Image: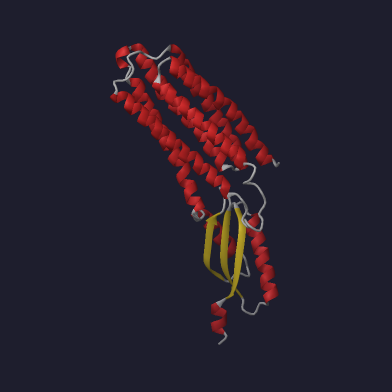
Amino acid sequence: MNTRQKTVDKLTFFSILTNLFFSFAKILAGHFSRSQALLADGIHSTSDLITDLAILIGNRFWDKEADSDHPHGHQRLENLVTIFIGITLVGVAIFIAVEATQNMIAGGSQKAPGFLALIIAILSIIIKEYLFRYTVREAKQIGSDALIANAWHHRSDALSSIPAALAILLAQISPSLSMADSIGAILVAVLIAITGLKIAIPNLDKIMDKAAPPEIVEKVYEMLANTSFVLGTHKIRTRFIGPNSIAIEIHIEVDPQMTVKEADLKAQNLKEKILNAPLGITDVIVKVEPHMENICSKK
């Protein structure tokens, strides 16, 4: 197991333990304190466990080397896990919103949530925000989109606990405001849904062969312009083959008098130059063509 996999495992196990605690704490406190907002937040924490397990399983496969069946490697599995996390969040949000709306229509609870619910919500805000910051820092160092997505799942859990805590506090201040608990649950759902969409949509783009950002393509053009044997280029195509891995196809024009062997050697050198540049490019195809202006000028 490489360093990247070990980091993902370490953070995910830590996340599982945290989510197990808050799932049980929120659901039990929400039930006994009669807080629908905290129950909704507890369901959200339970969904964190599902995505933790998805990352733990996926981490065993997405860093595997390329093989004959998967010549570009297995990195897109990380995109799929990240999309799964986003979709799970949206599904949880819909469930919470429906439950809260039905409770409002039914007239809501007549009793204010207990003080225990407020304590659990505040603890969740503090600990989940810390877990978000810690996970994002580590995930950026190893370049893991799935881990960053899971970090945002922690942030959404922290944010969703804020309206839950406010709703519980309002209901305690005045029993006539007990409906605030259901409103808080709906606000929780909205925050969760927004986070889920922000996680899923960019990764859907990547598995649909989205092109690399323009600034990366521009840097490749600059490298070609500074390569003496490249007399022209008329096509550069890029696509994501993983969360942070880009494949690129380049059509270059060279002196038509150059031998095939010499052109192939120079193309290999250019390929190595691009792969070694800090651009996230992991696969390069260089197609060599004769420079048309040279051909025309000799006729």
How many numbered discs, if any?
0
Determine the image quadrant of residue 15: top right
- Residue shown at the point (58%, 69%) measured from the top left: 252
Indicate the position of residue 115 as horizontal and vertical percent values.
Answer: 44, 12
Q: Quadrant of the C terminus?
A: bottom right
Determine the image quadrant of residue 166: top left
Question: Closer to the camera, 168 or 46?
Answer: 46
- Looking at the image, residue 67 sits to the left or right of residue 209; the answer is right
- Residue shown at the point (39%, 22%) measured from the top left: 36
- Whether residue 126 appears in this view of the structure is no
Colour pattern:
secondary structure
- Looking at the image, residue 22 sits to the left or right of residue 72; the answer is left
- Looking at the image, residue 92 sits to the left or right of residue 5; the answer is left
Q: Quadrant of the N terminus?
A: top right
Indicate the position of residue 232 as horizontal and vertical percent values.
Answer: 55, 70
Q: Is residue 128 above or below residue 120?
A: below
Indicate the position of residue 60 as horizontal and vertical percent values.
Answer: 65, 42
Question: Closer to the camera, 87 or 128?
Answer: 87
- Looking at the image, residue 64 sits to the left or right of residue 186; the answer is right
Question: Closer to the camera, 107 or 206?
Answer: 107
Question: Closer to the camera, 154 or 130?
Answer: 154
- Residue shown at the point (52%, 38%) measured from the top left: 149
Indicate the position of residue 63 as horizontal and vertical percent values.
Answer: 64, 46
- Whether residue 38 appears in this view of the structure is yes
